[in-house]
Every structure is written in structure tokens, then in C-alpha cells.
Image (tube, helix red, strand yellow):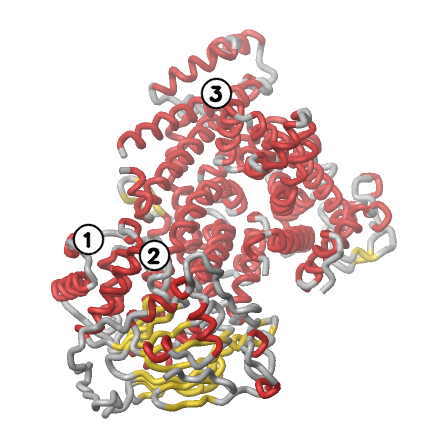
Amino acid sequence: MLGFAIQRVLQALVVMLVMSLLVFVGVFAIGNPIDVLIAPDVTQEIRAQTIAQYGFDRPLYEQYAAFLGRVLHGDLGRSFVFNMPVTSLIFSRLPATLELTLAAVFFATVLGVPLGMYAGYRPDSAAARVIMAASVIGFSVPTFWIGLVLILTFAVTLGWLPAGGRGETATIFGVGWSFLTLDGLRHLILPALNLSLFKLALMTRLARAGTREVMLSDTVKFARAAGESEWTVLRQHVLRLISIPLVTVFGLELGSTLAFAVVTETIFSWPGLGKLIIDSISSLDRPVMVAYLMLVAFVFIMINFTMDLIYVGLDPRLRKARS
Amino acid sequence: MSAPGRPKREQVPLGGTARSAEGAPIRAPLLEVEDLATHFFTRAGIVKAVDGVSFTLHQGEVLGLVGESGSGKTVTGFSLLGLVDPPGRIVRGSIRFEGRELVGMAPDELRRMRGRRLAMVFQDPTTTLNPVLTIALQMRLAMAAHERLSAAALRARCIEVLTIVGMPDAARRLDAYPHQFSGGMRQRVAIAIALLHRPPLIVADEPTTALDVSIQAQILTEMKSLVGEIGTSLIWISHDLATVSSLADRIAVMYAGRIVEDGPTVAVLRNPRHPYTRGLLDSLPAHTRPGGELAQIRGTTPSLLNLPAGCPFAPRCDRADAACEIEPDIVSGAGRSTRCHHPLEVAA
Amino acid sequence: MKDSATPFARFSREFGENRIAVAALAVVVIIVLLAVFAPLVAPQDPYDLAKLTLRDARRPPGFIGAAGYVHWLGTDAQGRDMFSAILFGLKISLQISVSAGLIALTVGATLGAAAAFLGGRTEALIMRIIDLQLSFPAILLALVLAASLGQGKTQLAIALIAAQYAYFARTAHGAAVTERGKEYIEAALSVPLPTRTVVFRHILPNCLPPLIVVATVQIANAIALEATLSFLGLGLPPTEPSLGLLIANGFQYMLSGRYWISIYPGIALVALIVAVNLVGDQIRDQFNPRLKR
């Protein structure tokens, strides 16, 4: 077990390194970073000074080496646009994105799995057909368009919910969380729903397919033969058996959801990392781009790692192989 | 073929029904199936998997239900427990168990009987046991379906039944997962689960088919002594005449969804009356001289979608004639019955 | 039941049994035709800035414009007829997504099949890179690429191809690995046929079914991805708006009730994607051996 963990950590470091190199080269090699920092009409002296100060006149590999050196000290550079350390910039925006993503994932799972299980349990019912039709739409329609429709319906036409922004926050451990306030919740619902839709559709379809398969299996027949109630069958047998493929997709899509937060945050003006990265891309704020992409890579590796651990927990047959 | 090797002690089955000297029951039978028919309504047509099955089972009896694949024996078993999945359903007939009619019973009532009064053991223990749950948990679920027990009492009961089915070191192995057991052990667990509530009837659907031959013999022996000790009635479904013969009191032979012959084991095996039974017996390797050709029943099993009118065995039968174009009635006598226009003569 | 028909005929017949899939296919065909013939069907050329009248800007559906015809779907902020803009937008969206998808398929499939064939460390290395890329969300990759490369059709296509080829590569690799273990390949190699011939004439064609399945999913994804990128301002220049950009432009007017500028392009987009997905679903089911009756 320990060997496995160490192996994964080493792999993660390698990936991070490669990621950082690719991103650094990709971002810094295109265009001229100096143009973002200073106005075009400054004097040559100031220009030369700034270039030297930031080391842009150095060859790329030197810049990268310096960058790595700083990273190892925890310094991810300063944002060209905000003129503040990237680290604090990212951490200030992180809670908002985290909140949004977790809420979306929560919706997707808590709604998707039961809906899918029902559709798999009673596949020929009218409700099941409606659920499946809705799920096709759910994963076909682009996230940004659903967002628009949501805003149009709930904010503009019905006026029930706000069209954007993050509501009031309540502070725990020095961090503000908006789901703790009523106003915050009102602002959270639409974007979270928007972000969750794709994953919701996927989970529903998967849960349905899995449930159908398991319901026809001998395990369920045997359980029924023992007189176990349908509820017991669904909870103790079906749910546990479909968990494994569900968790796989859950993990894979978690990263995707995090990525799509970019779109949702833009539409709903949600002040999170997603919006930050879009703004940085438009303004070519390179340090932020590099840091964001490295962070995403790191999160992905962590997700994969956690998933591996969860698998072993869910499927006892895997434990045997390890020991 | 040896006679059933159960100890010849006096039969005092559950419920205390004694028998008269000839074996005729004094109390009502445990299970009475009359003209049971289960059809599957598929897109390709109606599959008449079970079409007019009748038999009786008394307390403490072992019935061997024998037939090829597709004969309807498994579906009969499922029908008894009400486990027929759509698009199949019981279309007619009656199943009277302990005096209560099971066909048309409310689903919840039926559920309460399953596991407690009638239990079933399936063919492949690898797929019947849930791979992600411990044995303990699976037994707990089966137990909790009908009875509330304290954790300690539950554990004690589980260890008890596991020991009865011959699992060594039951207390420790209770917390293991199915994949940590061999095939034979897994089947013993399944049987143990069936025994948890001491049901008066167990339906075993080819329980040894998926196991090694040596394990088969073991389990067979254990079932024999179990039945003898506890007095459970058993319906043993199999395609293998040989296995069934050593265990069953009575044999019922199925063909194309019907029972074509029914009677005490020794009598049926020594003097089969239905040509199909004769054919089955003749094709057993034990019946052939070493080096001789294995006998076969000519033709193939009919498709249950398009059964010919009249006797379904007629196309394969050497004794068939014009009379066989009409469905034969059941001819009974002396504890035996046959569905044939031209039953074989009983040898002296 | 005649079974002497060609595989394609059998496939089409089974396809025809699902009414929803047939309807979806009809929708796709109609949209594609409209898009291809957009210059002929559309009442206005939305790219010709000279033809636009600002006076006609932001008019609701049904409005009769300066040129004398009815704007069935209204006009946008520059006075463009929405119907025309949508048709041309569909044309561009389809052009880019389908061509990027096909190129990604070719590149990815060749890479995957080649990797399977080269074997050894080359194969391991290539597949490692592919797996790495697959574990990274496509949208982020496309985002960064589109941002770095700038606006324009080619750049956008490159971003889409880069984001998608990995799926094809992995599918092709999996299928090729299965094929290469089969005996007919052994036979072909022992003739000896050159590796290149074996890969292109024997292995790749047999990898087609799973690739087609992936392609249907990926084309729908490509359309959505392109629209998303355009929506975020990273795809095509404003002079040649794809559906995503049209929607983005109309976003600000939604709050003031001028929904048609965003909604109608959106409906067109959704109809296209849903239809492609439904057709893809049916094709996928038909290729799935486990569902064979």
C-alpha cells in the first residue's frame, strides 16, 4: 500500500514538472510579455529596464529555471494585471470556485443517482422515459446555453433568483462561504444547477444502465428468494454494486466539472478561478495562466489518486490483489 | 442406480405428519401444484416454458425434477417462489403450499413466505452471492428480512447454520468475502442462507452443476443427511439422472414444459413408462457396455415457441402413431403417472 | 427475414426501426443542407457590412426591414437578419467541427494504430502521453490553445483537433491491439506484406466501428466546444460569427428582454447537437455486440 502511494506521488511530481514546462513554454513563448506590463508609449529606457527586471531578455530555458526555483520557494510570481502575488490571488478566488463545484457535484449525485436508479428499476414507466429523454438533452446542450436559459427563465422572466454575482458570505476559519447565508444561497442555486446538469445527465444514465443490469442478475434473484424487501435489494445490493462504475465516472467528470466552471462563472459573473482564468487569457496575464494550469494539473492528479484509493475501498476483490 | 441411501428411521417430518404403512399420507401434502403454466410473452412470440405441470410433495420428501435444458424445470422452480421476471408470468394453475394458494397472492405476503417457508438455492454461487458484501452481512440481510435478532444472537445463528453445512472455522470465516472461498464453499454458504429460517421446503436448482465432480458428491451427501436430520422437503432440479437418483424419493421427468413421468425413484428408474425416460436412461454411460456406442434419443428438443400439436415428444419417439397427434392425458396408478398414449409395459 | 442484404442495408433497416433516430437524422440532414446552401437560402449576406442598416438593429421577430423583407427571427445589434446570421453561423460551426473532427480522427487513429503496431517502448511512450492528455479536461486545453494561437478559423480548428485526437488515438489503439492478436494479421505479415500495408489496409478498416462510435460523440462535442470557445470570445473573429459568438453577442440584450438575439441561435445549436447525439446513440447501440438479440 505504501509503495503504491509513493509510486503515485513520484508520478505526480513528474507530471507536474512536465506540465509546468509545457505551460511555461507555451505561454511565455508566444507574444511578448512586456507588452502587457507597460504602456506602449513609454520610453525605451523604461522598457529596457522593465525587461531586465523581469528577466525577459534571458533565454527561455533560463527564465524557466528561474521560474522553477521560485516555485520551489512557494512563489508563483506576480500577476501582471493585478500586481499582486499570484498565490494570494488564487487563494482569494478559490473558495468561490470550490463552493460552486462542490454544490454542482452534490446536485448531480444526489439527484442523478436516485433518478437513474428509478429509471432502471421501472424502465418501462412513463417517468423513466421522461427521465431518459431529459438526460439526453442534459448532456447534449452546451453548458453556456443552459446558463442563458436559466437566467432568462428565473431571473428575467420570473424574477425569482438573481442573474449573477455571488451573494453575501459568512466567514468560517477566515474564509467567506456564501452557502451559509440565505442571500448567498439564492445566488448559488442557478450557477450550481447550470454546472451540474452535464454530470447529472451522465450519472442518471449510468445509474439507470447499472441498475437494469443488476436487477436482472442472480444476486438480486437470490436476495428476493430470501425474502428481502425491494427496498433492501435496492439499497444493499443494487446501490453497492453500481457504485464502482459510478465512482469512476464521478471522478473523471469531477475534473471536467472543475474545468467547465470556467464557463459558468463567466455567465453568472461568479468571482472564482474560472472567471480569473478567462480574464487572464484575454489580458495575457501569463503568471496567472501558468499558475492556474499547474494547479489544475495538481488537482487532477490528486483526484485520480483518491479515486484509486476509493476503488480499493469499494471492491473487496481488489484488496486481495494488493496484499 | 442405488436406492436412496437415507437412514431408514421413522419419518417424523416437520408438522409431525406420520405416514401409514403404504406411504400414503395421513395429513395434507405440503405442496400441491396443479396445472401450472408459466408463459413468456416475448417479441418473437409466446414461449410456453411451463405448460400444465402438476405434482404433489409431502413433508420430508425429496422430489427430483429432471429434464434437459429448456424443459421448463428452472422456470417451474421460479414459479413456485414467485420469482418469474417479466415478460414471463404465471398464466394459469394453482400452487397450494401449506394450504395457502400462492398464485395470485399479494406480493408482500408472498415475500414474507420466501426465505421463511420456502427457500431456493441457485446454480452458480459465484453470481448468487454479492461480491462486495461479507458473508456475515448477506446472512444478516436474509435474517433481518423476517426476524429481528440481536447482533449476538444473529451471529450465533449464522455460525450454527454454517457449521451444519460443513464449513470449518465458521466463526472466523463469517467476516470474509465470497471471492475468498472456493466454489464448493460458496454453495454451502448459499445453502446455509436457505436454511437460516428452517423453511419446510427448499427448491434447489442444479446446485451442484457448477461445481467439481468431487465437491458435487460431497454436497450431495451432506444434503442427504441434512434432509434426514432436519426433515426439510426438497425439490432437487437437475438434468443429471444419476445425481438425483441417489437423493430423491420421487422423480418427475419434464419435457417441453410438461411432466411426462412421475413416480417413486426406484420404480421409475427400473421400469420407466415414458419413452423419453427410457431414452434418458439408455443414454447414460453407466448403462452402456464399455466400448459400446452411446445410445441417443434421435432428434432435438423442440422450440418452445412452436410446439407441435399433440404429444411434444412424438417427433422423436419410436412408438408414435396417429393417436399421438392429440395431447395425451395423464395416466395414473399405483403412485405413478405418465403422460403417454403408449406407455412402456411395466416389467415384472 | 432476408439476410442476403449487404451489411449496410441491414444496418439501415435496423436504424429505420427507431423512429426517434430517424427523426433526428432528418433534422441533421435538414440543418446540414440549410447550412451548405446558406448563401442561396439566406435573404441576406450577414458578412457584407455594407448591406447592414443600423436602423434595423435589435428589431423583434416579424419586423419588416429596410430591404423590404420580413425578418422572421428578428435582427441583432448590427442590424443583421438573425435567420441569415444563424444559417451562416451553422455553416461555419459545421465546417469547423466536422473538418476538425475528421482530421482528429485520422491523426488519432493513425497514431493509435501505429503505436499498437510498433509495440515496445514506443507504444508505451505514445500511450502514456495520450493517457496523460486524456486525463486533462479538453475544454481547458482548447481554451489555452485558442488563446495562445489567437482568433481565426485555422487556429480554432487546430485547438479542436489537439483537444480531440487523443480520444480517437486511444480507441484506435485498443481496437488495433485486439486485431493484431488475430490470426489473419499473422498471416498477412508472414507473406510478408509491409507493415504499412498491413496497418492501413487490414487493421485500420477493422477498427472502424468503434471509431465511428467515438466520432459521433466527438462531433457533437466538437460543435459544443467550438460554440463554447466562440462564446468566450476565443474562437472566430466577430466578422464571421459562428453560433457561439452570436449567442455571446446577444447575451447582454437578454436582460432587457431582447431575447431573440441569443435564443434563436441557441435553439439552432441545441437542435443540431441533440440530433447528432440521438443519431450517434442509435449507431452506438447497433454496433454494440452485447445488445445483439
Q: Quadrant of residue B211?
A: bottom left
Q: Amino acid at mark 1?
A: Arg
Please name whichever residue, B39 or B223, is drawn nearer the observer in this view of the structure.
B223
Packing grade of label 1 (10 A; few <14, some 14-19, many >=20) is some
* Label placed on residue A21: 3
Tag 1, which chain?
B
Q: Residue at x 37, y 64 (%)?
A: A220
Packing grade of label 3 (10 A; few <14, some 14-19, many >=20) is some
Residue C221 visible in image: no
Q: Position of residue A108 (x, y in %)?
A: 44, 54
Please name whichever residue, A5 or C50, is drawn nearer the observer in this view of the structure.
A5
Distance, label 3 to label 1, CA atoms, is 53 Å
Q: Residue at x 37, y 71 (%)?
A: B237
> Which residue is the site of mark 1?
B173
Q: Residue at x 65, y 26 (%)?
A: C195
Q: Name the outermost residue toward the bottom.
A: B26
> Which residue is the site of mark 2?
B211
Residue B3 higher or lower than B154, as above or below: below
Distance, label 2 to label 3, CA atoms, is 58 Å
- Say whether marks 3 and 1 touch (CB < 8 Å): no
Q: Position of residue A229 (x, y in %)?
A: 32, 71
Residue B300 higher or lower than A38, as above or below: below
Packing grade of label 2 (10 A; few <14, some 14-19, many >=20) is some
Tag 2, which chain?
B
Q: Position of residue B121 (x, y in %)?
A: 32, 67
Residue C200 higher or lower than A132, as above or below: above
Mark 2 or 3: in front is: 2
Quadrant of the image containing the C terminus of chain C: bottom right
Image check: A3 left or right of C94?
left
Q: Amino acid at mark 2?
A: Leu
